[in-house]
Image (cartoon, rainbow, N blue to C red):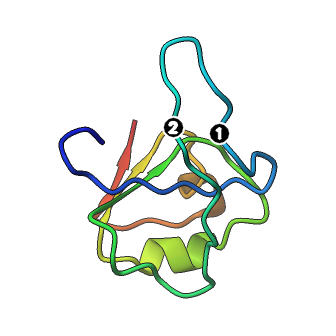
Amino acid sequence: MTKGARVEYNDPHLLNLPIGRWHQFDLASATLAETAPPEYDAVVIVIDRSRFPYEAILRAPALIVDTRNALHSRRFHGPHVVLA
């Protein structure tokens, strides 16, 4: 973020990021649309929530890094999806 990246996150259970031991990010949970988010260069899935619109996320043209196997477990696959 210090190099100019725009970062957003969405979590219905964590509406604002808490102050951490070494970092403080002034971020609030962004709205996650039911349509594909074309404005992102990458999407990183770090938590598996049943309320996320995974089909819409899969339609995004961006690189998707799935650290929780959320897409694969729902039988969603694509050439731009990377498991981590």
Q: Which mark is residue 17?
A: 1
Locate the N terminus by quadrant. Answer: top left
At which x and y percent is residue 36? 47, 83
Report the residue marked by disc 2: 25
Q: Amino acid at mark 2?
A: Phe
Q: Residue furthest top?
A: 21
Q: Is residue 21 above or below residue 72?
A: above
Q: Residue at x 51, y 37 (%)?
A: 25
Residue 41 versus residue 3: which sits nearer the camera? 3
Find out whether the residues at labels 1 and 2 contact each other: C-beta distance under 8 Å: yes
At which x and y percent is residue 66? 46, 47
Q: Residue at x 63, y 53 (%)?
A: 73
Q: Residue furthest bottom?
A: 35
Locate the C terminus by quadrant. Answer: top left
Q: Amino acid at mark 1?
A: Leu
Residue 66 versus residue 73: which sits nearer the camera? 66
Q: Say left or right for 55 vs 50.
A: left
Residue 42 is drawn in which quadrant?
bottom left
Query: Of label 1 and label 2, which has the lower sequence position?
Result: 1
Instruction: Classify 10 Å Cα crowding around label 2: few (below 14), some (14-19), many (20 and above).
Output: few
Q: Is residue 70 above or below residue 56?
A: above
Helix, strand or loop under label 2: loop
Q: Residue at x 30, y 68 (%)?
A: 62
Q: Is residue 25 above or below residue 36?
A: above
The alpha-carbon separation of the residues under discs 1 and 2 comes to 7 Å
